[in-house]
Image (cartoon, grey):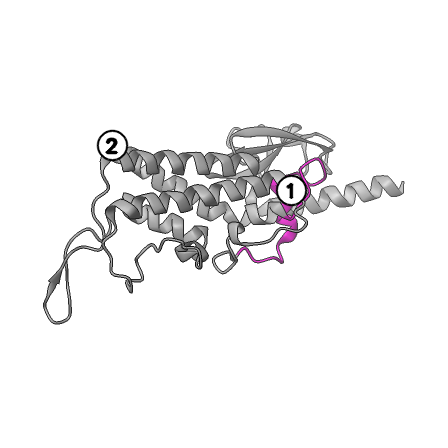
Amino acid sequence: MQPLAIARAVEDLATVREHWGELLLAIETPPADVWPPRQLSHTMRADEQLVVEDRAPLTLREHPAPLNLDALDAGLAIERALFDLADTLAAVVQHAELDDPRRWNFRSPTSPGSRAHGLHWAAVWAEGRLLDEDTTPEQLPDGTLVSAPFGTLPEHLVHEAVRVARQCARRLLRVLELDARETELGRPCPWCAGDLVLHTEAGHEPYVTCSTGPACEAPVPLDDEERHRVWGWHDLLDLVTALQEAGEHRAAA
């Protein structure tokens, strides 16, 4: 397997970890046929911390009333895929002792094993196997040399890890509508009534442009070609607020 493919798989696993909190919020948010679009909805919930390492895995949690079933289905599928991948890799290359914190523990009829630690741990653990971490013999404090906690992944398992990481990242970005796309917001610019377009692309922060260009008096900069006003990531909450206020003003008129 080429190093570039492994590097991309590591990036895919990082993408899943970094956006996992947004997926958890999406499960609790109505689908994107309401304002604001899903890509911006989490900016309206800045008071909610996206700390997800200590939240129970979706596969171990009850979901009495999820507001977005597509997001829930995607989350469950991604979790299961990464948990199953960790099981597969561990069955072949893991030699760590039972008390080694680096060990991936299999589930049993009475325990979820390492799955209880959630998606973050599964993704980090799989990344370590892709990067051949902890694959050399280790020396104990008394000088005794012991075998490595893990072996090197065989080629077919590297291919499997790369495939699963790619599928998980693509599905997560797609359900969050953060894959490469342009979405018309369907609301006029509050400053000039121009058309607003939301731009998203995997690995990049979303931004919004106004079609009016330099004539728009919005308090945000122009793009590099000086053709559109641009609300970058840190300006989006101000834009969402301005659009809400404009909508309320029109409703009251």
Label 2 crowd bin: few (<14), some (14–19), many (20+), radius 10 Å: few
Residue in view at x 54 percent, y 39 percent: 74
Determine the residue positioned at 33% across, 54% down. 104
| Left or right, 138 with reference to 163 | left
Which mark is drawn over residue 68? 1
**In the image, 76: left or right of 185?**
left
Q: CA distance from mark 1 to mark 2?
A: 38 Å
Task: Say left or right for 112 vs 41.
Answer: left
Vertically, is 114 above or below 230? Answer: below
Image: magenta residue range: 28-50
- Report the magenta stretch's main SS: loop
Residue 186 higher or lower than 88, as above or below: above
Q: Would you say the residues marked 1 and 2 are in contact, meaning their CB atoms lie under 8 Å apart?
A: no
Q: Is residue 220 visible?
A: no
Residue 2 has which mark?
2
In front of the other: 162 or 157: 157
Q: Quadrant of the C terminus?
A: top right
Q: Position of residue 128 (x, y in %)?
A: 30, 49
Tag 2, which secondary structure?
loop
Which residue corresponds to the image point at 28% horizontal and 43% vertical from the top-left? 130
* Three-letter residue code for mark 2: Gln
Name which quarter of the figure residue 115 lies in: bottom left
Residue 10, image x and y in percent? 35, 42
Mark 1 is on which residue type? Asn
Residue 114 placed where, x, y %? 39, 56
- Residue drawn at x 29%, y 65% as measured from the top left: 99
Query: Around disc 1, counting alpha carbons within 10 Å, would you say few (fewer than 14), some (14 to 19), or many (20 or more)?
Result: some
Q: Nearer the viewer, residue 186 or 193?
A: 186
Q: Which of the two discs, 1 and 2, labels the residue nearer the N terminus?
A: 2
Q: Which mark is residue 41?
A: none
